[in-house]
Image: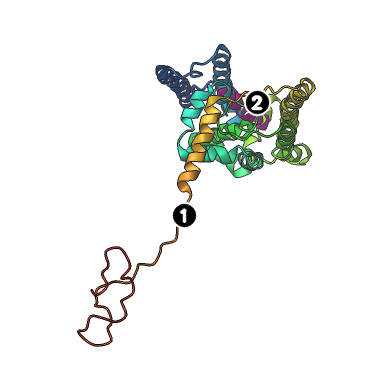
């Protein structure tokens, strides 16, 4: 049996992380040529980018990635938490609003953004991804296939973006719940997707055969490793999401106390709403503003007379119209 801590390069993960950084730099340079305000990243956004890429490095390379794939359920949960609670929000915070507006401007992408950032939809989508990635067949498949691992990691990053979509205020076109609604949303997100952790804590036998040798990696039996993973999932998730909910409520309370509104309406948000209104107008069926009037009778036959050839008698209908002559 190989050592749990044997070094592996994880070249695909390094290339993917480097590609993200290159794409970011290229998007920033292209946006700088437009000279639109808000396209240049701030110093904080550069910090968020570096922190988000670092979280990806820790989660997707040696040793966490190796332990998560073959040895420890606790390591697998750590990897999931890094992707959804750290890397995803940090990378979103690193993007200026103008860049996000350009990336989500196509109508299909904007429609997906509008739908998945609704709190109810976000809860469902994130729960499906978070719970689905922990199903026994999925964990077994990612343990034996690097391709499956890559697909699951990308899905978790997307799920993390969906989780934080209604929370972050700089995403043009995203749903913006009230502070109370946001706190309720984060409370639900901290409870519903985390119900597998309760199963891990109270299960009487290991659920994942692939982690049967956890003692060789972390010195715990497979069952103890599973219970530790359940506790860690709750201990790490609840403080993060509840802290953000508390900050939202505290900010709302301060705004109410001082009678101010700290919410800043950006031009990117205004432009997105105008684009959506224009698309809705284009999809609206055209209505006829006036009924079509019946055509007047044709004057292609001579007027009716009492006697043939006399040219006198009752006139044909419509002879008083412009251009008509009584007698044909």
At 76% from the left edge and 27% from the top edge, which residue is drawn? 249
Instruction: Determine the image quadrant of residue 323.
Output: bottom left
Provide the secondary structure element on which disc 2 rests. helix
Position of residue 281 in the picture relative to residue 92 (left or right): left
Q: Is residue 74 magenta?
A: yes
Which is more toward the observer, 38 or 260?
260
Query: Looking at the magenta stretch, what is its main secondary structure?
Result: helix
Q: Is residue 165 visible?
A: yes
At 77% from the left edge and 20% from the top edge, which residue is drawn? 258
Query: Which residue is at the far left?
Result: 309
Residue labelled with disc 1: 287
* Badge number at residue 311: none
324, above or below 100, in the image: below
Residue labelled with disc 2: 217
Bin the neighbour count of mark 2 within 10 Å (Cα to Cα): few under 14, some 14-19, many 20 and up: some
Residue range (magenta) = 72-91
Q: Is residue 140 visible?
A: no
Q: Position of residue 257 (x, y in %)?
A: 80, 22
Which is more toward the observer, 50 or 268?
268
Q: Position of residue 271 (x, y in %)?
A: 51, 30
Bin the neighbour count of mark 1 within 10 Å (Cα to Cα): few under 14, some 14-19, many 20 and up: few
Q: Is residue 310 magenta?
A: no
């Amino acid at each position: 049996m190989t050592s749990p801590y044997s070094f592996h390069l994880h070249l695909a993960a390094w290339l993917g992380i480097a590609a993200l950084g290159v794409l970011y730099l290229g998007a920033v340079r292209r946006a700088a040529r437009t000279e639109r305000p808000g396209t240049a990243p701030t110093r904080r956004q550069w910090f968020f980018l570096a922190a988000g890429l670092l979280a990806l490095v820790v989660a997707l390379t040696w040793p966490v990635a190796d332990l998560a794939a073959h040895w420890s359920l606790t390591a697998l949960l750590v990897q999931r938490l890094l992707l959804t609670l750290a890397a995803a929000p940090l990378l979103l915070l690193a993007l200026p609003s103008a860049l996000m507006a350009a990336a989500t401007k196509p109508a299909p992408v904007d429609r997906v953004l509008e739908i998945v950032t609704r709190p109810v939809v976000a809860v469902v989508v994130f729960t499906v991804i978070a719970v689905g990635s922990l199903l026994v067949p999925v964990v077994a498949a990612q343990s034996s296939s690097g391709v499956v691992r890559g697909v699951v990691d990308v899905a978790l990053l997307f799920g993390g973006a969906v989780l934080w979509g209604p929370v972050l205020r700089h995403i043009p076109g995203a749903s913006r719940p009230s502070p109370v609604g946001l706190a309720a949303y984060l409370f639900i997100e901290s409870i519903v997707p985390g119900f597998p952790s309760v199963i891990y804590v109270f299960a009487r036998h290991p659920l994942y055969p692939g982690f049967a040798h956890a003692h060789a990696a972390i010195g715990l039996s497979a069952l103890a490793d599973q219970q530790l993973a359940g506790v860690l999932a709750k201990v790490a998730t609840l403080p993060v999401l509840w802290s953000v909910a508390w900050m939202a409520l505290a900010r709302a309370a301060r705004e109410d106390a001082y009678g101010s509104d700290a919410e800043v309406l950006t031009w990117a948000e205004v432009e997105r709403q105008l684009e959506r209104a224009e698309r809705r107008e284009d999809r609206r069926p055209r209505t006829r503003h006036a009924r079509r009037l019946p055509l007047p009778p044709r004057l292609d036959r001579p007027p009716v007379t009492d006697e043939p050839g006399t040219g006198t008698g009752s006139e044909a209908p419509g002879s008083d119209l412009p251009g008509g002559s009584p007698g044909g």
